[in-house]
Image (tube, grey):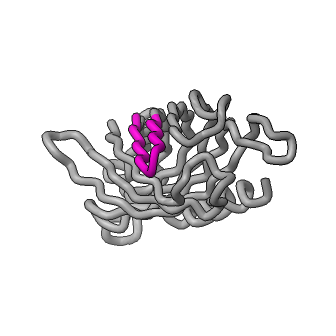
Amino acid sequence: MRLLILYFVLAISGSIPLMAQSVPQIPGGAISKSSSPKKSSFGSKLQWMPQLGLNLSENQINVNLAAQVGYTFSKSLLVGIGGNYVFTKDDNAPPGLGGNYYGGSAFTQYALSKLFLLRGEIESMRVDYFDEESNQALREWQVATMVGAGLTPKILGIQLQTSLNYNLNHEPGRSWRRTPWIFKFGFSF
């Protein structure tokens, strides 16, 4: 929980200087009302981002469907939340493991240029795991703290997004994803 709070504090504190706007002045020091910046509506600063994640590893398939909404604080900074649904199939899993997982996420995305971005995301998922002490499948919430980089090309007027992310909380044998590397693909409008 402390990590989640720290994540949002860093995201918001990093965006405050970016939100400041200067008011244009005309010669002589008077403020020009006609050339003052136009205020954007809240809705115009939202970006809707459906995503598709695919994780293929030895005998395991994860298909991740997510819907995220982000608020644009500046041309470079986007902060948002989302919901996730994952279908997973693991050929080596004990009986009772796998199937349908769900959860939510919070993210920060910083555009280095029109094409390159950096991304941080905290994801909490309700998943199955095998408890060796009780020898049974159990459900728990697992938190993944991901950092990554990606590309955002614009093709035919659609802003695409691909990113390769690394799960800093990955625990081999415990995490529901077998690999700490997560590839995501999506678009925004």
- Is the magenta region chiefly helix, strand or loop? strand
| The one of 180 and 113 positioned closer to us in this rendering | 180
> Is residue 160 in view?
yes
Residue 63 counted in the magenta span:
yes
| The one of 91 and 125 positioned closer to us in this rendering | 91
The residue located at (63%, 53%) in the rendering is 144
Q: In which quarter of the image is the C terminus?
A: top left
| The one of 147 and 72 positioned closer to us in this rendering | 147
The residue located at (65%, 40%) in the rendering is 125
Specify whether 25 is left or right of 129.
Answer: left
Outermost residue to the right: 134
| Above or below 104: residue 24 | below
| Above or below 145: residue 129 | above
| The one of 25 and 39 positioned closer to us in this rendering | 39
Q: Position of residue 186 (x, y in %)?
A: 35, 42
Q: Position of residue 154 (x, y in %)?
A: 20, 49
Q: Where is residue 26 in the image (x, y as percent from the top left)?
A: 32, 65
Specify whether 73 is left or right of 150.
Answer: right
Specify whether 62 is left or right of 111.
Answer: right
The residue located at (54%, 35%) in the rendering is 84
- Residue stretch rendered in magenta on the structure: 50-64
